[in-house]
Each structure stands twice: as structure tokens, then as C-alpha cells.
Image (spheres, grey):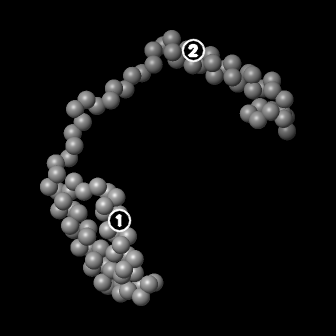
Amino acid sequence: MPVPSEYAARRRALIRRHHPDVGGDAEVLAAELDALDREFAQRRAVVPPRVVANPPLRVRPTGRVRRLRRSATRAITRLRGRLPRSVPGSRRYFEI
């Protein structure tokens, strides 16, 4: 299968050569880009898609881990409420 950077390099070269801003023709540019896309689509169709033999496992945290995470979050929130306003990350609430 072609490396994506090869496709990008060839596409950039075609655009540099045929872009209307540099004196090229828009129709020629469109035709060349279509031909390039068709060529790379054929190359991609030849190579079978890669199959992942062992998909990554998703592990849910246990009850202990969830409780620890909750208590740590509460402790951090309490600490942030006690920090002076000049400290980044502090929380200050006031009544309106």
C-alpha cells in the first residue's frame, strides 16, 4: 500500500504545477487530481485491510478505585476552595 506521504507529495507537486494562481489551468488540475485519486484508489483496493488480532481490552475500574477517585476529587475540590485567589486553580464563590 502506498505511504500517505507519497500521495500527499504527488498531490502537492501537481497543484504546484497546474494551479490557476501560478498560471495553470483549473480543468487540467482537476483532471490530474482525479487521475491521481483513481490511481491511489486502485492501489488501496489491491491491499486487504489490516485486521487487528487482539483488540484492546476495556477494563472498568473496580468499586474501590471508583471510591478512591471520588474521595480524591472531593479532597481536591476542598483544597482549591481554601487557596487564595491569587493562586491559579483556586475556586471562589460569592453571593450575588
Task: Provide the secondary structure element on which disc 1 rests.
Answer: helix
Vertical arrangement, residue 4 with respect to residue 94, above or below: below
Vertical arrangement, residue 39 with respect to residue 17, above or below: above
- Chain-order first, disc 2 or disc 1: 1
Disc 1: which residue: 9
Q: Which residue appears at 51% of the width and 11% of the height? A: 64
Q: For the residue carrying disc 1, how many other residues have a C-alpha within 10 Å: few (<14), some (14-19), or many (20+)?
A: few
In percent of width and height, residue 29 lies at 33, 80
| Quadrant (top left/top right/bottom left/bottom right) for the C terminus | top right
Q: Which residue appears at 36% of the width and 72% of the height? A: 13
Disc 2 to disc 1, C-alpha distance: 51 Å
Q: Is residue 25 left or right of residue 96?
A: left
Disc 2: which residue: 68
Vertical arrangement, residue 79 with respect to residue 28, above or below: above
Indicate the amino acid at tag 1: Ala
Residue closest to the eye, 33 or 79: 33
Q: Is residue 93 visible?
A: no
In percent of width and height, residue 10 lies at 32, 68
Q: Which residue appears at 30% of the width and 63% of the height? A: 7
Task: Provide the secondary structure element on which disc 2 rests.
Answer: helix
Q: Is residue 22 left or right of residue 14?
A: right
